[in-house]
Amino acid sequence: MNETEGLRFRRVHRPQVITDELPENRNKGTGTYSGKVFQVTLLSLGGFLLLPLLVIILILESPIHPEVFSLKEPPLMKGCWEPNLKLREAQRLFEDQISGPESITNIGDVLYAGTADGKIVKLIGRRIHTVTRLGKPPCGSVEEESSCGRPLGIRVGPNGTLFVADAYLGLFQVNPTTGEATLLVAGGQLVAGRKLSFINDVAVTRDGRKLYFTSSSSRWQRRDFLHLIMEATADGRVLEYDTETRELSVVMENLRFPNGIQLLPDEESVLVAETTMARIRRVHVAGLNKGGMDTFIDNLPGLPDNIRPSSTGGYWVAMSAVRPNPGFSMMDFLSQRPWIKKFIFKIFSQEVLMKFVPRYSLVAELHDGGVCTRSFHDPNGLVAAYVSEVHEHDGSLYLGSFRSPYIAKLDLSKV
């Protein structure tokens, strides 16, 4: 056999590549004609549907105009902040009988709260009695809040008088026996060029002469609270009202969502929860430092709401949303990305967005210097959700909520 015949022999036995492709399709393209038609039709239909949507999103004006702001890296959830399940030891009271009891106070053993349907109620044993309604019905929906009213912060003044901060209607003095309500400061009015659009919490001096209250925004109302958090504009204020002279003045301004407020024992300063900034500020309202401000505690692991005194000389702070570390904090992520916030609010309503906010309830006791001494948690808010305030009375914590249909009671002897 010569060399040419050897080469011919080896070509005959060249290995064959085995595939699942049928012989008649081996020389055709990667897809059939009908397959290509289907792909083109699908892409055309997708483009036909998506293009108008994209155009609408680009044209739509975002309801919020967020600012860039910086938050420090959240503190590690260890030590005093170590997660636990202690809030799950709480008992629900008046479940499905009361709506959104944001703030709670007591006269003797009788509890008082403001509800989402515009009422001031007193709780005696297992019964709920209506003291008064600050606004006018109909009530029950977010759209009706501005006329119905939404009582938030509530305090007891001298002689058992109640002082109530209504988000829309203003500051009221309420007789808990007769239900007579006297308007002290009208909501919605202009004060120093800015509107009282969202009155939030109130504190009262021991003699009842001075009221200090927070105006969370001059732009947004309570029903748009998530817009306020996401926009993060510094248009919140602390104001003072003198019940004798009826003088209303601004004590501090340019705060980002000032929320809960609490007088210190010397009554020369107040603690103010600056919700968007995850911190608590000390605003000096009297004395040599009047008009000044410093930080009581910075970089909390959650967004603070109301502040109330504890029996050990500290302060209870309620947080219904946390900045987990380790973990992912949406609040921190979005603080530097206002364009994402704009896009989100173009296509989703506040109610839809609230469904994506993790329900994690956290309450903490803080002492002078912003030292955390103990904290109680309910991951996922299974027992106590949307906690807005912690009111301590007779060895128990009563947990208010801006959204839940109950009051949660935690026996401190059990935790």
Image: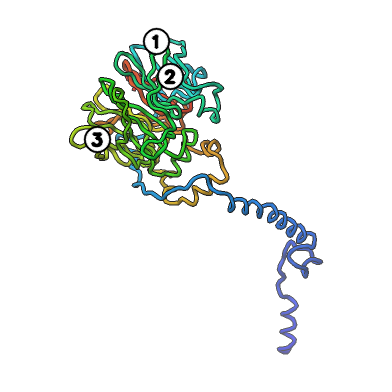
Q: CA distance from mark 2 to mark 3?
A: 38 Å
- Quarter in which the C terminus is drawn: top left
Relative vertical location of residue 189 with respect to residue 15 in this rendering, above or below: above
Q: In front here: 73 or 118?
A: 118
Which quadrant of the figure has residue 120?
A: top left
Which of the two discs, 2 and 3, sits closer to the camera?
A: 3
Residue 271 image point, x, y percent: 29, 33
User: To which residue does mark 1 refer?
Assistant: 177
The amino acid type found where label 3 is placed reads: His
Tell me which label, 2 or 1, sits earlier in the chain.
2
Q: CA distance from mark 2 to mark 1?
A: 28 Å
Relative vertical location of residue 162 with respect to residue 76 in this rendering, above or below: above
At mark 2, the secondary structure is strand
At mark 1, the secondary structure is loop
Residue 338 image point, x, y percent: 46, 50
User: To which residue does mark 2 refer?
Assistant: 91
